[in-house]
Amino acid sequence: MRAQHTTHPLPAFPVYSCAFVAPDQMVVGGGGGAAKTGIKNKLRLFNISQDRQLKMLCEHELEKGEDAPMSISAHPESRSFVCGINSSEECLKRGENENCRVFSINDSGNTLIKGATRGTLPSGALEDYQRVTVISPDGKLLAVAGERDLSLLSFPSLSPVVQSVQVPKGEIYDVTFSSTHLVLATSLNLLVYALPKPPSEDSDEKTPKKKKSKQKGKGKEKEVHSRTPSQTPELRLVDTIDVPSVPGAPAQSVVTFRAARFHPSDFSTLFTAVNTAAPRAKKSKMAKMQAYILKWRVDLNGEQKSARPISMEGSRKAGEGGLTCFDVSPNGKFLAFGSSDYSLGMLDSTTLSPLLSILKAHEFPITTVRFSPTSTMLVSGGVDNSIRIVTVPEKFAGQPWTMIILIILALLAILVAFLLQK
């Protein structure tokens, strides 16, 4: 069944990020960025109908000089989301960058309400931005990262859970949670950390001191928990996975990780996206890029007694050109990716077989892809001032190819056995 899809132009609104806050509602971040382009940076809330029609419910215009929302992660249960928005250049120069921001949606669904904010990027890093924003599956933790620095915060308070981590080499591209671990994907490796255990209610540990702070502009005092750096634990690194050799990639290719996602309901499965750059030919101006999706078997708790906690068990070429964004459907059946060659694709998560491909989904490289909470829609966005809404075909959603293949094989076996009896 051919996938139905619809493009929606958003005049003067380059799209950088998006996330579903409900099965039929999506928040989109975009604008002209930090440059003085005259295009305002905004957050917009849209309703998406089953026939892929788009209706804007409200928008929140950011303050003058602030950057565009470069990454978003939503928590549909609380109708809230977190996004990465750099403060104005003047604030950055003063070392005042409230880059991590929580927003919620009011009961009427027509207003975005600004909540807690926190600065997590290094002071004075004028070119850095919050490129990664991920809420844990249980909705209690939030991981945010810039180019080299990772912060693990509680959600929605944004208070630090552990000391921040700075990667010694490579660039951070993604973070993914299991129930017990966090995997940090850098360009050069996967860093696997054990999540800290939540404090027990009957623990003898001392409760963090409380301090009183005035809420700006309201004159009210509220109590907030604070920890000194010595009280905040460190993330424990349990494994490092270097970039692997990719089957099918040209010899001597440079391989870099681009994204990582645990299977939503099976944390023993991990998916990563990698880009490969072949050695540049003499007459070529640029190195040839290719993208691959890798599937890994994960045994971080030692339940399967594997020789290696994380081992690769499959790969699939995703296309020519570098992969720019990646997502796994909430039901765990589909993998979606956007590419620098403007294409949008989807794979079966079990077999890594291609399910659909839209060769020119956008006019520029795709910046964001997201599945809806029901896994029935896929949305992509780009700086070409548009988003594309794809209806996931019912054939794929209801009958995975692996099941069809097994049925065919069983019928063939019965037929062969019948013929042999004759």
Image (cartoon, rainbow, N blue to C red):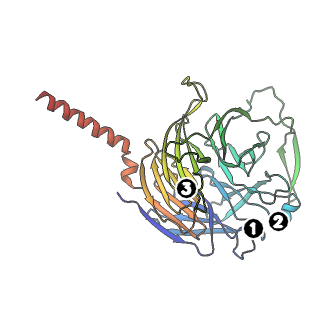
Residue drawn at x 24%, y 37% as measured from the top left: 411
Q: What's the mark number on residue 171?
A: none
Q: As rendered, which of 240 and 50 lies closer to the eye?
A: 240
As measured in the structure, the alpha-carbon distance from the residue carrying label 2 to the one carrying label 3 is 30 Å
Is mark 1 in CB contact (under 8 Å) with mark 2? yes
**Residue type pointed to by label 3:** Arg
User: Left or right: 343 with respect to 239?
Assistant: left
Q: As rendered, which of 304 and 153 lies closer to the eye?
A: 304
Give the mark nearest the N terminus, 1 or 3. 1
Residue at which label 2 appears: 89
- Helix, strand or loop at label 1? It is loop
Residue at which label 1 appears: 34
Give the mark nearest the N terminus, 1 or 2. 1
Q: Residues within 10 Å of mark 3 (few under 14, many from 20)?
A: many
User: Left or right: 345 with respect to 100?
Assistant: left
Is mark 2 in CB contact (under 8 Å) with mark 3? no
**Residue type pointed to by label 2:** Glu
Q: Nearer the viewer, mark 1 or mark 3?
A: 1
Q: Position of residue 268 (x, y in %)?
A: 54, 34
Give the mark nearest the N terminus, 2 or 3. 2
Residue drawn at x 76%, y 40% as measured from the top left: 161
- Helix, strand or loop at label 3? It is strand
Tell me where residue 218 sits by quadrant. Answer: bottom right
| In the image, farthest residue toward the top | 305
